[in-house]
Amino acid sequence: MGSPEFGQSQKELALTNSWSSSSSNQQSFIVSYLINSIGLSPQSALSVSKNVNLKSPEKPDKVINLFKKCGFTQTQISSLISRSPSLLLLDAEKILLPKLEFFEAKGISGPEMAKTLTSFPRILAASLAKQIIPSYDFFSNLFNSGEKVISVTQRFPDILTHNIEKLVSPKIDILREHRVPNSNIAKLVTLNPRVFTLSLDRLREIVEKVVEMGFDSSKVTFVLAVYAFMTMSESTWESKVDAYKKCGWSEEEVLKAFQRNPWCMMHSKEKVTACMDFFINQMGWRPCVLAKYPAIFGLSLKKRVVPRCLVFQVLLSKRLVEKEVSFNALLLSSEEKFLQKFIAPYEKEGPELLKLYREKLDLSNGPHSDEEIR
């Protein structure tokens, strides 16, 4: 007869082998399910299987069928589950369906809902009653529009998962302390909802910097400047200042241009250089004059600036216009107003103008990749 210790060891070994076999079988089932029902590759299925504990196909089958019924493609379902496998463990009817019905009722349905939720599956794990609906209501009041909330949600789904009390309200309070109107706060959130991912100290630092630069907090340029500093580092700011200075602007002119139109500091250095080269070297315009119209640096060179300037140069060569031109009329006006001012009045003197202009526009719509044409 064996010793007690030997008998106990044999028993423990049998239990261990039984558990190991059961565990191995369960993981095999999960991997097989993820491959055959979800469409994951064997490698992805093995990786995902470590983060989800499926005991039977009943619950995950209901989840998959619900997604299919709501218009999700097999590829989207595979992406969704690989990124958030815990969704397979949720109750399809009690947990997931009410959320999908909520988004559908708000105007996101079919392919759009599938695209939005696939890009940010975490929103499906958030509580509908405690997180999604309160966030939607909060931003509806801020935007004064439910449609705008949905529009922003489609670009940044995580806006509905932010903690309102801890992450959102304190940052909005910083802007309100500086008397930024709600409409402009809404503008900033619409431009970049990730303002709420900034630390309080970082947002306060940016806002105070914008105040020191002389921006009026009641105007939309204030939040545009805040947005600009949110999206670039100090070194990036300096490199763009240098780009303008190399083209003939003083630092004071750069700052004044930024105050007039903060977007001018959000263009790439390549875009700035290309525009300056055309305006100064081909059109003969002085840098100090350009500094007063920073909005022109946001225009497409190929699609607007070059075609319109070509018309102007033809008119100038025929002495039909003065060399000093209004940038607002030539470059910043609508297509209709441009045609009325620079094409229609000279139909007899320059019949080729409209044809030339149209040809240049057609060429600008050809293949291209450089940023300045966008």
Image: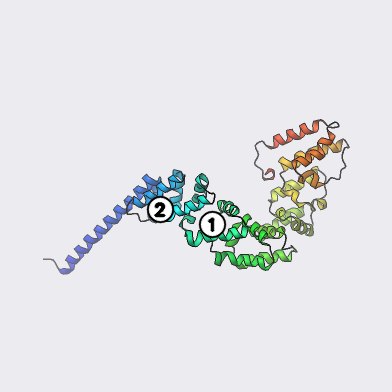
Q: Which residue is mark 2?
A: 93
**Quarter of the rendering occupied by the N terminus:** bottom left
- The location of residue 52, given as percent across then percent down, is 38, 55
Q: Residues within 10 Å of mark 2 (few under 14, many from 20)?
A: few
Q: Amino acid at mark 2?
A: Glu
Q: Depth-wise, is mark 1 or mark 2 nearer the camera?
A: 2
Figure quadrant of residue 344: top right
- The location of residue 218, given as percent across then percent down, is 72, 62
- The location of residue 251, given as percent across then percent down, is 77, 59
Mark closer to the chain start, 1 or 2: 2
Q: Is residue 138 visible?
A: yes
Q: Is residue 194 visible?
A: no
Q: Please tell me whether mark 2 sits on a helix, a strand or a loop.
A: helix
Looking at the image, residue 296 lies above or below residue 20: above
Q: Which mark is residue 158?
A: 1
In the picture provided, is 91 more to the left or to the right than 307? left
Which residue is the extreme one toward the left? 1
Q: Please tell me whether mark 1 sits on a helix, a strand or a loop.
A: helix
Q: Amino acid at mark 1?
A: Asp
Q: Residues within 10 Å of mark 1 (few under 14, many from 20)?
A: some
Looking at the image, residue 355 lies above or below residue 231: above
